[in-house]
């Protein structure tokens, strides 16, 4: 029996990431991945059961980081800004995987990833802002506004991640986006 080689496996993963990034899960071709990795299609299936298994192998580490963030927030240890900074740290290592989950995961268990992040952001914004507003005697007439703020912010965040490769530019723009959305947000409800 031939031993599975890390070098071949890593080439398959690298080409699969490109294929999923360019074509999405549904349109990705296992044959194209094999050809671009320089291996026979049968060899790809020696390493991965199917396309879904290969996709999961690529995005699961980034998703686990997201789950860790969600668990931290459930413990109410972090503010929304701290969660965004956590996402920025995850993005250093998993930017492509995050974008694949957001934009190219239709047909997989990760298809709702963006909605999950938005829901987490909405809860963090509401839980952080509502007590401040109540202290000031400000009533929020429709709490759906927290969903709108979260959705718009998350879309802006991923627009930046899609457009900019350089980490310094990405961090700068995300920081500016956070200022735009969240500095003195409570005063905008007055």
Image (cartoon, helix red, strand yellow):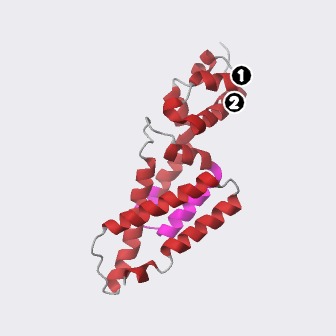
Q: Residue at x 60, y 33 (%)?
A: 19
**Which badge, 1 or 2, is on the more N-terminal residue?**
2
View extreme (bottom): residue: 136
Magenta extent = 70-93
**Residue 127 picture location, percent across and down:** 37, 70
Q: Secondary structure at mark 2?
A: helix
Residue 167 part of the magenta-drawn span: no
Q: Residue at x 59, y 70 (%)?
A: 176
Q: Residue at x 45, y 78 (%)?
A: 185
Q: Residue 147 sits in which quadrant?
A: bottom left
Between 73 and 13, the residue placed more toward the observer is 13
**Residue 58 picture location, percent across and down:** 57, 38
Between 88 and 9, the residue placed more toward the observer is 88
Residue 38 is tagged as 1
Q: Secondary structure at mark 1?
A: loop
View extreme (top): residue: 1
**Residue 135 picture location, percent across and down:** 34, 85
Q: In which quadrant will I find the N terminus? A: top right
Q: Is residue 91 left or right of residue 184?
A: right
Q: What is the distance, in whole Å, between disc 1 and disc 2 at their CAs?
A: 8 Å
Q: In which quadrant will I find the C terminus? A: bottom left
Q: Around disc 2, counting alpha carbons within 10 Å, would you say few (fewer than 14), some (14 to 19), or many (20 or more)?
A: some
Q: Around disc 1, counting alpha carbons within 10 Å, would you say few (fewer than 14), some (14 to 19), or many (20 or more)?
A: few
Q: Is residue 110 above or below residue 76?
A: above
Majority secondary structure in the magenta region: helix
Q: Is residue 177 left or right of residue 123?
A: right
| Residue 75 visible in the displayed image | no
Residue 11 is tagged as 2
């Amino acid at each position: 029996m031939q031993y599975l080689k890390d070098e071949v496996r890593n080439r398959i993963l690298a080409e699969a990431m490109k294929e999923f990034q360019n074509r999405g899960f549904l349109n990705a071709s296992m044959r194209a991945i094999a050809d671009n990795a320089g291996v026979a299609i049968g060899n790809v299936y020696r390493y991965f059961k199917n396309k879904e298994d290969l996709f999961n192998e690529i995005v699961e580490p980034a998703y686990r980081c997201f789950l860790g963030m969600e668990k931290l927030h459930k413990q109410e240890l972090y503010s929304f800004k701290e969660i965004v900074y956590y996402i920025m740290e995850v993005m250093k290592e998993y930017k492509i995987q995050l974008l694949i989950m957001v934009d190219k995961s239709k047909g997989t268990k990760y298809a709702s990833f963006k909605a999950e992040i938005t829901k987490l952001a909405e809860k963090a914004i509401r839980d952080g802002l509502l007590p401040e507003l109540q202290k000031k005697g400000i009533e929020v007439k429709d709490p759906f506004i927290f969903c709108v703020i979260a959705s718009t912010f998350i879309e802006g965040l991923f627009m930046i991640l899609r457009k900019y490769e350089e980490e310094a530019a990405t961090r700068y723009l995300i920081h500016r986006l956070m200022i735009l959305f969240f500095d003195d947000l409570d005063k905008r409800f007055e």
